[in-house]
Image (cartoon, rainbow, N blue to C red):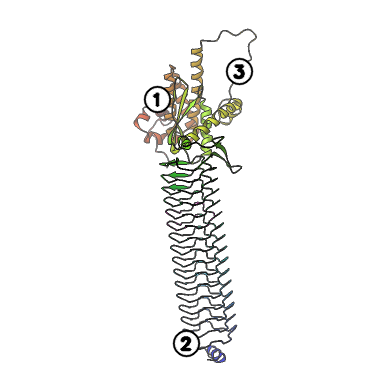
Amino acid sequence: MEKGELLDRYAAGERQFAHVDLSNANLSGANLRDIDLTGANLTGTNLSWSFLSRATLAGACLRKADLRSAAIDNTNLDGALLGGAIAAKADLRLSSWRDTELTWANFSDADLSGGDAVGANFDRGNLERAKLDNTNLTGAQLMEANLRRTSAIAVNLSEANLREAHLEGANLRGATLVRANLTEANLTGASLRSANLSEADLHRAILVGADLCEATGDRADWSRADASGAYLLKASFQHCQFVRSTLDEVFLLQSDLSGANLRGASLRKADLSSTIFKEANLSDSNLEGALLVGARLLRSQLDGAKLTGCCIENWQIEGMNLETIDCQYVFVQFDRARKQPFDRFPSTGSLQPQQLTQTYEGETTAIEIDIDGDMDWEALAFTLSKLSLELSDLTLAVKSFSATEKGNVLQLSVNRPTNGAILRKRFLELYPHIRDRLKRHRRSIYPLLGFPTPRTPPPAPKTPPPPPPLPGKDKRLQLYQETAKQIQFILLNQEPHQFVENVERLLEYLETRGIATQEIQKKIIGQAILQRAKKDEVFRENLLRWEKTASKAARFSTVGKAVKVAIALLWPQPHPPPSP
């Protein structure tokens, strides 16, 4: 059919032109909306700048056709042949491409958003800077295709073949790549944030500097892949294969690599803070200079792993064998302001066999700390507050306090297993410093907390003072006064489920020292609870809630009885339930 005849019949209202032969015709700029060219021969046809919206081109042959800047939106191209066609900057939105053949075709800068291209063959095609947002490319063939800087947000590439494809700088945010073949694909600098790569094959793929934050890639194969400097924050890569992969300087913070195989992988200077390695295999891996701050290595393998220069602040290890690792020294603290580790262990020389195991392997939920001299309970409260700020995922509480022949022993309880040696060391660094500062600044701190300002001691008398009381009596009096202050502080700052147990321990401690506590029980405890309850509505509700949920032993303890008395004074009649 000649060009003129087609245009005349179309202008007359005819739309059915199935199986016509228009090969090599020049239809540039033609208006052919809603035309039916099913099975037509359009080989080498010039359709640039033409209008083919809502057209039917199913099964048509468009090999080497010129479709540049054409409007082909909402068009049916199922089973069409477009090998070698040029469709740069074409508008193909919402079109159907099922099982279409597009090898070596040029779709650079084209818009294929929202299309259906299931099973389409784009092998060695050019889709550079094209738009594939929300396009369905399930099972598509894109081997060695050029997808550089392509926008493919939320694209579906499940089971697609992207072997050796070029995806440098592509935007695949939220893409679905389940069981996709990305072997030797180049994804340098690509965005795969929140993408689903489950069971994908990334063998020998290049992902240098790629963004995979919050991505899911469980059971994917990353063997020998290069993801140096990639961002994998809060990602899930459970049971993945990272055998001999390169992950130098990656950001794997708060990710989950449970069951992953990282045997022989390189993770030099990687940031693995708060990452989970549960039953993972890190044998023969290189972790030199890596940050394992808060990392959880649970029943994982580290045989032959290199850990020299790692930062292990607050790491959690359980069921680990550290005797076969290659490690000369580690850092046990991390400076977040300067973003660098410090406090080398050992301070000089190299680690001796079993030294790291003996010092840092024991994880516990109860930390014992030896305290020289009498306990300053105010300093303890501020020290625990400081530790809670530094270790936001840990909850610390006083479990017990006892006196021994050599000194006092404080036992802290922790909400999860943690490294006792590191926590103990940090406490002993903070406590003396906070105690000294508290002594110097107590007069300015008390008003901020609503406490009476401490009285200024009277000037020294001119006449010689009377002889001091016996040391034993004076010591007990001082201990009584300090403990009474601590009890008052605890009652005014902690909730009932906390202060009942803590104050009971302090009372027991005084009694073991032969100091009567009746005065404290009568005046300080009840008055402090009542005073706080009258001012703090939330605290009043917490008192009621505690009375209903506390154990029998807690309710009938000395402090528990004081709480019940306070409740009776506050609510002479049956009290209402606490607000939800």
Q: Marks 1 and 2, how far apart in space? A: 97 Å
Q: Say if 420 sits above or below 1 in the image.
A: above
Numbered mark located on residue 96 in the image: none
The residue identified by callout 1 is 558
Tell me if residue 396 is in the magenta stretch: no
The residue identified by callout 2 is 19
Q: Which residue is drawn at 57% across and 91% down?
A: 4
> Between 153 and 578, which is closer to the camera in this rendering?
153
Q: Say if 564 sits above or below 63 in the image.
A: above
Which badge, 1 or 2, is on the more N-terminal residue? Answer: 2
The residue identified by callout 3 is 457
Q: Which callout, 1 or 2, points to the residue nearer the camera?
A: 2
CB within 8 Å, label 1 to label 2: no
First to last magenta residue range: 214-242
Residue type, numbered disc 3: Pro
Q: Marks 1 and 3, how far apart in space? A: 34 Å
Residue type, numbered disc 1: Thr
The total of numbered circles placed on residues is 3
Tell me if residue 236 is in the magenta stretch: yes
Residue 153, image x, y percentages: 52, 64
Q: Marks 3 and 2, how far apart in space? A: 108 Å
Residue 190, image x, y percentages: 55, 61
Quarter of the picture holding the C terminus: top left
Please, which residue is most extreme toward the left here? 552
> Between 201 and 108, which is closer to the camera in this rendering?
201
Residue type, numbered disc 2: His
